[in-house]
């Protein structure tokens, strides 16, 4: 009976040693896993911070592009208004007054010619009108070209804004995923 008791004590000591070694190994493994989880959590935090910084930069770029686009749209409106003003200002002259020169009024007296400018010669008037018309047409063409250029630039900025907004949405989605992953790691 003494041998059986000694054997039982010896078996329990061996089992205790095995359990102790398993506990030590399990503790080492858990500490290692904890370090990996901390490193993973730190990596996620760094990625979240990087994504937030990128998001802030994209939002700032988007806002700047939107401001440029709005300024260009205002510029386009100003140019359109100037073009319309030029159209309104340039109306073909009426020659009704010139046709009355030298004709008699209905009561039989001749009409007094209006005060003529220094060049009353009709050819000079036509040349001056032609030059003015040519200058206005050139100015009109330049305004149209500038308007077209501004519209193309505004369209490019609109496309850039759309791209930036898409990027921001992607960053927001990634940021939400990273935050979710971070909270899962912390739990």
Image (spheres, rainbow, N blue to C red):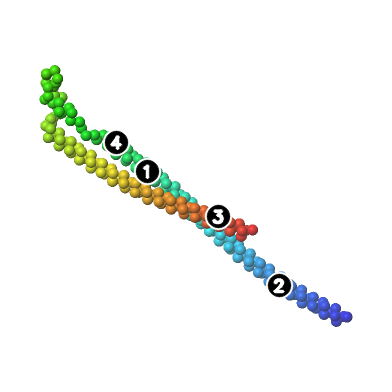
Dot 4: within a 10 Å radius of its alpha carbon, few (fewer than 14), some, or many (20 or more) residues?
few
Q: Please report whichever mark, 4 or 3, sits nearer to the chain's N-terminal start.
A: 4
Q: Secondary structure at mark 3?
A: helix
Please state which of residues 137 and 44 is positioned toward the viewer in this rendering: 137
Question: Measured along the vertical axis of the image, is residue 181 above or below residue 130?
Answer: below
User: In the image, which is nearer the foreground, mark 4 or mark 2?
Assistant: 4
User: Sequence-wise, which precedes: disc 3 or disc 2?
Assistant: 2
Residue at mark 4: 85
Side (left or right) of 11 relative to 138:
right
User: Are the residues flagged by discs 4 and 3 in contact, CB closer than 8 Å?
Assistant: no
Q: Position of residue 24 (x, y in %)?
A: 70, 71
Residue drawn at 64 percent across, 58 percent down: 187
Side of 30 relative to 140 (left or right)? right
Residue extending farthest to the right is 1
* Percent position of residue 139, x then y: 24, 41
Residue at the extreme front: 106
* Distance of label 3 from label 2 (alpha carbons): 40 Å
Q: Quadrant of residue 133?
A: top left
Q: Is residue 104 above or below residue 150?
A: above
Residue with the most extreme top position:
107
Question: In this view of the protein, which residue sits in the foreground, 187 or 121?
Answer: 121
Please state which of the two labelled residues, at mark 4 or mark 3, is closer to the viewer.
Answer: 4
Determine the image quadrant of residue 35: bottom right
Disc 4 from disc 3: Cα separation: 53 Å
Mark on residue 73? 1
The residue pinned by badge 3 equals: 176
Foreground disc of the pair 3, 2: 3
Provide the residue designation for mark 2: 22
Query: Marks 4 and 1, how far apart in space?
Result: 18 Å
Secondary structure of residue under mark 2: helix
Q: Looking at the image, is mark 2 or mark 1 earlier in the sequence?
A: 2
Q: Is residue 177 visible?
A: yes
């Amino acid at each position: 009976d003494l041998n059986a008791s000694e054997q039982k004590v010896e078996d329990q000591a061996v089992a205790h040693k095995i359990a102790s070694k398993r506990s030590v190994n399990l503790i080492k493994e858990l500490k290692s896993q904890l370090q990996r989880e901390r490193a993973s959590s730190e990596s996620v935090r760094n990625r979240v911070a990087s994504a937030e910084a990128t998001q802030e930069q994209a939002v700032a770029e988007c806002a700047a592009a939107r401001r440029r686009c709005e300024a260009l749209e205002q510029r386009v409106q100003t140019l359109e208004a100037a073009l319309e003003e030029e159209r309104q200002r340039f109306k073909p002259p009426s020659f009704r007054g010139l046709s009355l020169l030298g004709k008699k009024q209905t009561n039989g007296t001749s009409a007094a010619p209006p005060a003529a400018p220094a060049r009353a010669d009709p050819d000079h008037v036509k040349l001056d009108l032609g030059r003015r018309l040519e200058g206005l047409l050139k100015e009109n063409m330049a305004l149209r070209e500038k308007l077209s250029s501004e519209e193309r630039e505004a369209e490019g900025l609109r496309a850039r804004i759309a791209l930036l907004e898409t990027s921001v949405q992607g960053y927001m989605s990634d940021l939400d995923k990273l935050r979710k992953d971070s909270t899962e790691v912390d739990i």
